Image (spheres, helix red, strand yellow):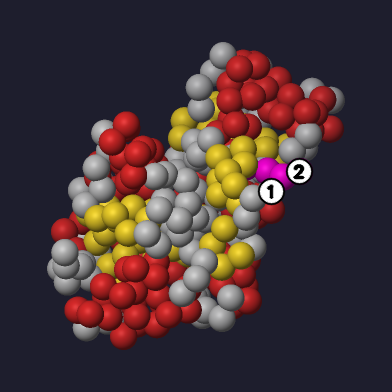
């Protein structure tokens, strides 16, 4: 087993670097090893609740210095996709937390509130992601706008996310609520789609040949990496297990217990 040909890593966060607000063991040592090896890295998360700056601040609390430009969120990727498709000022309805609201606003779109939707305002697009504050009314008004003809965009399909107490419902669960109420499937922007992988590689100056994805979920991180032509490293500290590999038929190039085991291999090869 050798990681020597890999010069760049795209790192998932939840379940790889931490669970909830608890850093996984060896987090600081892992980043120190990457810097000793002069490996490029970008953090790419399907979580759309936070901005890149908020993730920088979270990592700083864990003793790790990562600049915002190293961080790609599905919120940013979704907003960038919308800007390619729609003019500045286009009305967008958002089901999501601060990260998604800020990303959509930063691209110049006009956000329609649930109160405005209830009063008859229309939106060209409904964008939905994970939210801890989503109420029935917020999601119902999104469904109402889709029924009125708005396009339905989802930040990511993750059915769950790893927390300190175990997996909890994720963005995919909220997307399914709206899909069930409208019969409309969302267009998904985050992993396993190619957009976030492409954005991360551009930031590092990497190529599929010298870049690997480190993730904890077979159906998004690993499948997306393989589809994008990258090497795929599964860590068992989050959602997917070795049994899942056999059952799902999605084969990573490497399987490690956690980032601590990756650090040990990198240190041996230094």
The one of 55 and 199 positioned closer to us in this rendering: 55
Q: Magenta residues, as a range? A: 129-133
Which numbered tag is attached to residue 97?
Answer: 1
The crowd level at tag 1 (other Cα within 10 Å; few <14, some 14-19, many 20+) is many
Residue 170 in the image: above or below residue 57 = above
Q: Residues within 10 Å of mark 2 (few under 14, many from 20)?
A: few
Q: Name the spot of residue 140 as percent of width and height, x first.
A: 74, 24
Residue at the image position 40 percent from the left and 53 percent from the top: 236
**Mark found first going from the N terminus, 1 or 2:** 1
Q: At 21% across and 52% down in the image, what residue appears?
A: 253
Q: Position of residue 196 (x, y in %)?
A: 39, 51
State left or right for residue 15 relative to residue 103.
left
Quadrant holding the C terminus: bottom left
- Looking at the rendered structure, the secondary structure element under dot 1 is loop
The residue labelled by disc 2 is 133
In percent of width and height, residue 61 lies at 63, 76
């Amino acid at each position: 087993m050798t990681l020597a040909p890999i010069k760049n890593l795209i790192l998932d966060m939840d379940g790889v670097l931490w669970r909830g607000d608890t850093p996984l063991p060896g987090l600081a040592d892992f980043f120190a090893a990457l810097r000793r090896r002069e490996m490029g890295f970008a953090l790419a998360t399907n979580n759309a609740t936070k901005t890149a700056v908020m993730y920088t601040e979270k990592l700083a609390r864990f003793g790790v210095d990562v600049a915002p430009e190293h961080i790609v969120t599905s919120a940013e990727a979704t907003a960038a996709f919308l800007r390619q498709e729609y003019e500045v000022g286009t009305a967008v309805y958002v089901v999501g937390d601060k990260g998604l609201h800020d990303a959509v606003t930063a691209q110049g779109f006009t956000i329609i509130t649930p109160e405005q939707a209830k009063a008859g305002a229309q939106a060209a697009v409904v964008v939905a992601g994970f939210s801890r504050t989503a109420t029935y009314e917020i999601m119902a008004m999104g469904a109402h706008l889709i029924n009125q003809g708005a396009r339905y965009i989802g930040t990511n399909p993750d059915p769950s996310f790893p927390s300190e107490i175990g997996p909890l419902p994720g963005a995919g669960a909220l997307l399914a609520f709206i899909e069930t109420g409208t019969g409309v499937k969302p267009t998904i922007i985050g992993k396993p789609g190619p957009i976030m992988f492409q954005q991360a590689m551009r930031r590092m100056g990497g190529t599929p040949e010298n870049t690997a994805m480190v993730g904890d979920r077979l159906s998004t991180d690993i499948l997306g990496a393989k589809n994008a032509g990258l090497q795929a490293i599964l860590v068992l500290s989050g959602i997917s297990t070795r049994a899942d590999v056999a059952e799902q038929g999605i084969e990573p190039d490497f399987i490690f217990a956690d980032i601590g085991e990756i650090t040990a291999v990198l240190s041996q090869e230094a």
